[in-house]
């Protein structure tokens, strides 16, 4: 497999590991957006979050929780980001969680600033989406 994260897990590519468990790993991002930008990944290759087993998911987010407290010390606030699939901006098709320390002066802004305009939906469109999503 030609996955950079799988190569990091196997030790083929060196990295600055922060903490790891039997199923997950965290390390400094090689192309950080801010000082202290960390990635947390499952060790098994999965393209999307919903492909993880319940156990892998639990382990991944337990590690996110642990590492978040350390990352948050850098600036006091941390952006948690997951691009879940190519259309969501996922560049490497291996689940990864970004922990990005944020500050008021980093020019990134809130999530709504990522999109050029906000979506205006009719009540019937909202109901249709609601019915597709609810359990």
Image (cartoon, rainbow, N blue to C red):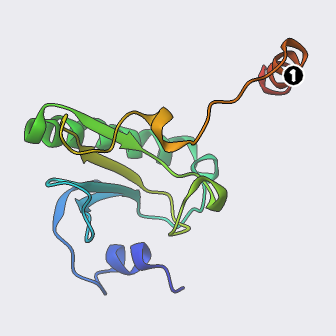
Q: How many marks?
A: 1
Q: Which residue is mark 1?
A: 125
Residue at image point 19% right, 34% down: 104
Q: In this view of the protein, which residue sits in the foreground, 43 or 109?
A: 109
Residue at the limit of the structure toward the front, as seen here: 117
Q: Position of residue 69 (x, y in %)?
A: 17, 34
Q: Residue at x 23, y 38 (%)?
A: 68
The N terminus sits in image quarter: bottom right
Front position in the image: 11 or 129:
129
Residue 22 is at least partly visible in this image: no
In which quadrant of the rendered view does residue 26 lie?
bottom left
Indicate the secondary structure of the residue bearing disc 1. Answer: helix
Looking at the rendered image, the quarter that the C terminus falls into is: top right
Query: Based on the displayed image, in which of its 4 quarters is residue 40 positioned?
Result: bottom left
**Residue at the extreme top:** 123
Residue 83 visible in the displayed image: yes
Residue 36 is left or right of residue 109, and the answer is left
Q: Of 12 and 115, which appears nearest the observer?
A: 115
- Residue 41 found in image quarter: bottom left
Q: Residues within 10 Å of mark 1 (few under 14, many from 20)?
A: few
Give coordinates of residue 59: x percent, y percent. 39, 44
The residue positioned 22% from the left and 40% from the top of the image is 102
Does residue 42 lie above or below 91 as drawn?
A: above
In this rendering, would 87 be left or right of 4? Answer: right
* In the displayed structure image, the side of residue 97 where residue 13 appears, left or right: left
Choose between 130 and 93: the one closer to the eye. 130
Q: Residue at x 84, y 17 (%)?
A: 122
30 lies left or right of 24: left
Q: Position of residue 62 (x, y in %)?
A: 33, 38
Question: Where residue 36 appears, x then y in whole percent?
Answer: 15, 53
């Amino acid at each position: 497999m030609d996955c950079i994260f799988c190569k990091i897990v196997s030790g083929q590519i060196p990295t600055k590991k922060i903490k790891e468990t039997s199923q997950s790993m965290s390390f400094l991002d090689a192309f950080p957006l801010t000082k202290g930008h960390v990635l947390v990944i499952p060790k098994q290759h999965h393209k999307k979050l919903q492909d993880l087993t319940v156990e892998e998911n639990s382990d991944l987010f337990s590690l996110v929780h642990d590492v978040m407290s350390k990352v948050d010390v850098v600036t006091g606030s941390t952006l948690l980001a997951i691009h879940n699939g190519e259309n969501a901006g996922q560049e490497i098709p291996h689940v990864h969680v970004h922990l990005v320390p944020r500050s008021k002066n980093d020019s990134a802004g809130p999530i709504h600033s990522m999109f050029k305009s906000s979506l205006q939906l009719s009540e019937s469109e909202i109901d249709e989406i609601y019915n597709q999503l609810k359990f």
